[in-house]
Amino acid sequence: MTTLEVRRVRQSDPDAAPLVAELTYEYTSRYGPLGAQEMQRAADVFEPPHGQFLLLMEAGEAIAGGAFMRHDEETAELKRIWTHSQHRRRGLARRVVEELEKEAQTFGYRRIYLTTGPRQPEAKALYLATGYTPLFDVDADPATIGPLAFDKVIH
Protein backbone atom coordinates (compact mmCIF):
# COMPACT_ATOMS: atom_id res chain seq x y z
CA MET A 1 0.00 0.00 0.00
CA THR A 2 1.30 3.42 -0.92
CA THR A 3 1.85 5.96 1.83
CA LEU A 4 -0.33 9.05 1.68
CA GLU A 5 1.30 12.40 2.29
CA VAL A 6 -0.68 15.37 3.59
CA ARG A 7 0.40 18.62 1.95
CA ARG A 8 -0.67 22.10 3.01
CA VAL A 9 -0.91 24.23 -0.12
CA ARG A 10 -2.76 27.14 -1.64
CA GLN A 11 -5.72 26.27 -3.83
CA SER A 12 -3.75 27.79 -6.71
CA ASP A 13 -0.90 25.26 -6.26
CA PRO A 14 -0.31 23.39 -9.55
CA ASP A 15 -0.72 20.05 -7.74
CA ALA A 16 -4.28 21.07 -6.80
CA ALA A 17 -5.29 21.93 -10.38
CA PRO A 18 -6.71 18.50 -11.38
CA LEU A 19 -8.86 18.32 -8.25
CA VAL A 20 -10.07 21.91 -8.60
CA ALA A 21 -10.93 21.28 -12.27
CA GLU A 22 -12.88 18.10 -11.47
CA LEU A 23 -14.69 19.74 -8.58
CA THR A 24 -15.63 22.72 -10.74
CA TYR A 25 -16.99 20.36 -13.39
CA GLU A 26 -18.92 18.36 -10.78
CA TYR A 27 -20.47 21.44 -9.14
CA THR A 28 -21.37 22.93 -12.52
CA SER A 29 -22.91 19.69 -13.80
CA ARG A 30 -25.02 19.33 -10.64
CA TYR A 31 -25.90 22.98 -9.96
CA GLY A 32 -25.30 24.90 -13.20
CA PRO A 33 -23.98 28.48 -12.96
CA LEU A 34 -24.29 28.48 -9.15
CA GLY A 35 -21.76 25.65 -8.99
CA ALA A 36 -19.29 27.60 -11.09
CA GLN A 37 -19.83 30.67 -8.90
CA GLU A 38 -19.00 28.65 -5.78
CA MET A 39 -15.65 27.66 -7.26
CA GLN A 40 -14.87 31.25 -8.25
CA ARG A 41 -15.10 32.42 -4.64
CA ALA A 42 -11.83 33.96 -3.48
CA ALA A 43 -9.56 31.09 -2.45
CA ASP A 44 -7.51 33.24 -0.05
CA VAL A 45 -10.09 32.42 2.66
CA PHE A 46 -8.45 28.97 2.77
CA GLU A 47 -5.08 30.33 3.85
CA PRO A 48 -3.56 30.79 7.30
CA PRO A 49 -4.12 32.26 9.81
CA HIS A 50 -7.84 31.48 9.45
CA GLY A 51 -7.96 28.60 6.98
CA GLN A 52 -6.04 25.88 5.18
CA PHE A 53 -6.17 23.93 1.91
CA LEU A 54 -4.91 20.33 2.15
CA LEU A 55 -4.06 17.71 -0.45
CA LEU A 56 -3.60 13.99 0.01
CA MET A 57 -0.71 12.99 -2.23
CA GLU A 58 0.04 9.47 -3.43
CA ALA A 59 3.09 8.73 -5.56
CA GLY A 60 3.47 12.45 -6.29
CA GLU A 61 -0.14 12.90 -7.43
CA ALA A 62 -2.95 14.77 -5.64
CA ILE A 63 -5.72 12.22 -5.17
CA ALA A 64 -7.97 14.00 -2.65
CA GLY A 65 -8.22 17.28 -0.85
CA GLY A 66 -10.28 19.81 0.97
CA ALA A 67 -10.16 23.07 2.85
CA PHE A 68 -11.52 25.00 5.77
CA MET A 69 -12.05 28.68 6.41
CA ARG A 70 -13.09 30.75 9.38
CA HIS A 71 -16.84 30.65 10.03
CA ASP A 72 -16.63 32.49 13.35
CA GLU A 73 -14.12 32.85 16.18
CA GLU A 74 -14.43 29.25 17.36
CA THR A 75 -15.81 27.58 14.22
CA ALA A 76 -14.11 26.44 11.03
CA GLU A 77 -16.18 25.77 7.91
CA LEU A 78 -15.20 22.81 5.74
CA LYS A 79 -15.27 23.37 1.98
CA ARG A 80 -14.18 21.67 -1.23
CA ILE A 81 -13.89 18.10 0.10
CA TRP A 82 -12.98 16.10 -2.98
CA THR A 83 -11.61 12.77 -4.16
CA HIS A 84 -10.25 12.40 -7.69
CA SER A 85 -12.65 10.30 -9.78
CA GLN A 86 -10.02 7.57 -10.34
CA HIS A 87 -9.46 7.13 -6.59
CA ARG A 88 -12.95 6.87 -5.12
CA ARG A 89 -14.25 4.14 -2.79
CA ARG A 90 -10.96 4.03 -0.82
CA GLY A 91 -12.01 6.04 2.24
CA LEU A 92 -10.03 9.07 1.09
CA ALA A 93 -12.80 11.63 1.71
CA ARG A 94 -13.07 10.35 5.29
CA ARG A 95 -9.31 10.78 5.66
CA VAL A 96 -9.51 14.34 4.27
CA VAL A 97 -12.22 15.20 6.80
CA GLU A 98 -10.12 13.76 9.64
CA GLU A 99 -7.04 15.72 8.53
CA LEU A 100 -9.03 18.94 8.21
CA GLU A 101 -10.51 18.45 11.69
CA LYS A 102 -7.03 17.92 13.19
CA GLU A 103 -5.66 20.95 11.36
CA ALA A 104 -8.61 23.12 12.43
CA GLN A 105 -7.90 22.17 16.05
CA THR A 106 -4.31 23.36 15.69
CA PHE A 107 -5.73 26.72 14.54
CA GLY A 108 -7.74 26.89 17.79
CA TYR A 109 -11.16 26.05 16.37
CA ARG A 110 -13.48 24.06 18.65
CA ARG A 111 -16.33 23.41 16.23
CA ILE A 112 -16.77 22.52 12.56
CA TYR A 113 -19.65 23.73 10.42
CA LEU A 114 -20.33 22.78 6.81
CA THR A 115 -22.99 22.71 4.16
CA THR A 116 -23.39 20.43 1.21
CA GLY A 117 -25.78 20.62 -1.68
CA PRO A 118 -29.02 18.65 -1.93
CA ARG A 119 -27.71 16.95 -5.10
CA GLN A 120 -24.72 15.41 -3.29
CA PRO A 121 -26.07 12.34 -1.46
CA GLU A 122 -22.57 10.88 -1.16
CA ALA A 123 -21.44 13.97 0.78
CA LYS A 124 -24.49 13.79 3.07
CA ALA A 125 -23.65 10.13 3.78
CA LEU A 126 -19.99 10.97 4.46
CA TYR A 127 -20.81 13.65 7.04
CA LEU A 128 -23.38 11.47 8.78
CA ALA A 129 -20.84 8.60 8.89
CA THR A 130 -18.10 10.82 10.35
CA GLY A 131 -20.13 12.04 13.31
CA TYR A 132 -21.57 15.31 12.06
CA THR A 133 -24.94 16.41 13.43
CA PRO A 134 -27.42 17.31 10.69
CA LEU A 135 -29.04 20.71 11.23
CA PHE A 136 -31.99 19.67 9.04
CA ASP A 137 -34.62 16.96 8.88
CA VAL A 138 -32.77 13.96 7.42
CA ASP A 139 -36.07 12.37 6.40
CA ALA A 140 -37.18 15.36 4.31
CA ASP A 141 -36.60 15.51 0.55
CA PRO A 142 -33.19 17.26 0.25
CA ALA A 143 -34.44 19.21 -2.77
CA THR A 144 -36.96 20.97 -0.50
CA ILE A 145 -34.32 22.03 2.04
CA GLY A 146 -31.60 23.75 0.03
CA PRO A 147 -28.08 23.57 1.44
CA LEU A 148 -27.75 20.76 3.99
CA ALA A 149 -25.99 22.10 7.10
CA PHE A 150 -24.01 20.02 9.61
CA ASP A 151 -21.89 20.72 12.65
CA LYS A 152 -19.54 18.89 14.98
CA VAL A 153 -17.73 19.80 18.18
CA ILE A 154 -14.01 18.99 18.05
CA HIS A 155 -11.61 18.89 21.03
Image (cartoon, grey):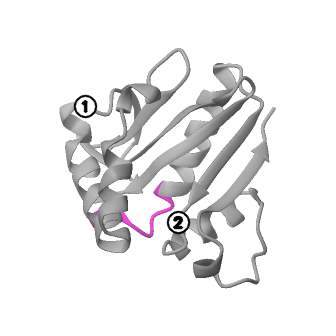
Point out residue 84 in the picture as x, y percentages from the top left corner: 31, 58
Q: Quadrant of the C terminus?
A: top right
- Which corner quadrant of the image does residue 15 belong to? top left
Residue placed under numbered mark 2 in the picture: 117
Residue type marked 1: Ser
Mark 2 or 1, nearer chain start: 1
- Left of 126 or right of it: where is 8? left
Q: For the residue carrying disc 2, how many other residues have a C-alpha within 10 Å: few (<14), some (14-19), or many (20+)?
A: some
Residue 47 spot, x, y in % from top left: 44, 22
Q: Position of residue 140 (x, y in %)?
A: 73, 83
**What segment is highlighted magenta in the picture?**
86-92
> In the image, is 105 to the left or to the right of 66?
right
Residue at figure coordinates x 30%, y 43% from the top left: 40
Decide which of 28, 125 is in the foreground and name it: 28
Disc 2 to disc 1: CB gap under 8 Å? no
Q: Is residue 88 magenta?
A: yes
Q: What residue sits 66% from the left and 85% below the top?
A: 141
Of badges 2 and 1, the one in the foreground is 2
Task: Identify the mark at residue 12; answer none if there is no mark.
Answer: 1
Residue at left 40%, top 42%?
A: 4
